Image (cartoon, rainbow, N blue to C red):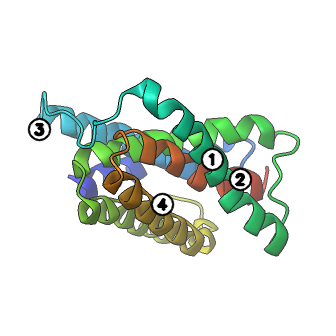
Amino acid sequence: MAMPAAGLGAALAAPLPTARLPLAVGGHVAVFLLLTGVLLAGAHLLFRPGRPPAGDTVGPLRAAVPAVVLLGYAAAAVALPLHLGFTSAAPVGARWWLLPLVALCCLAFLLGAELVAEGRGGRYAAIGGIAVVVLAGAAVTGLAPGFVLLVVPLFAALVAWQAAWAGVLRRRGAPWWLPAAVGAVLLAWPVATTLPLT
């Protein structure tokens, strides 16, 4: 289910005017993730209708405070090492409004992956890996900007890191949406704050 969704997401993202976002490469990556996430969720609803998401053990109100704390921790965990070790990772200028937009696209992808994985860590990691491979393939074949190839190793590391966090949160009984919310911050921050603007 993940491979067709990611492949179709890459094909649909190619002709879209992703350059209208002032992120030269990040706009394409964000739209690819958004489309793939919507397709994953749609496939889940089509082939597994009525099946509740795995890990829905904690009510949204009880999860609110841990969610805010974990979102802050995720932002610090990715922003501080990037900012102190590699490049400026502060959301300045247009990056302030791009960050929530890119995070929303990442959230769509990760929620779709959570639905399809149904709480299975290996399946969840495989969906992230498929997205990385398809994105790299799209760059090689011209469906995505060639610069994406330079970003793919970082993207792969972030996807793996997010999958590990998601596994820990699932084992602790977190609601199904919390790993996706935390992961959206983790993936979106470098895309929105470090990739070149147009």
Q: Is residue 92 left or right of residue 182?
A: right
Read off the residue under disc 4.
Answer: 162
Q: Secondary structure at mark 2?
A: loop
- Where does label 3 land, which residue? 47
Instruction: Using the numbered discs, state the Cα–Cα distance from disc 1 to disc 3 in whole angstroms.
Output: 30 Å
Identity, as a three-letter code, of the amino acid under mark 4:
Gln
Report the front residue among 66 and 147. Answer: 66
Q: Earlier in the sequence, mark 1 or mark 3?
A: 1
Query: At 28% from the left edge and 36% from the top edge, which residue is drawn?
Result: 56
For mark 1, does the 10 Å Cα neighbourhood hold few (<14), some (14 to 19), or many (20 or more) residues?
A: many
- Distance CA(mark 3)–CA(mark 4): 26 Å
Which residue: 61% across, 53% down? 74
Asked whether disc 2 touches disc 1, contact meaning CB atoms under 8 Å apart, the reply is yes
Which quadrant of the structure image shows residue 77? bottom right
Q: CA distance from mark 2 to mark 3?
A: 36 Å
Q: Check disc 1 and give the amino acid type.
A: Gly
Q: Is residue 16 at least partly visible in the picture?
A: no
**Secondary structure found at label 3:** helix
Q: CA distance from mark 2 to mark 1?
A: 6 Å
Q: Nearer the viewer, mark 2 or mark 3?
A: 3
* Residue appearing at x 82%, y 39% in the figure: 94
The amino acid at mark 3 is Phe
Which disc is residue 27 wearing?
A: 1
Q: Amino acid at mark 2?
A: Ala
Q: Which residue is mark 2?
A: 24
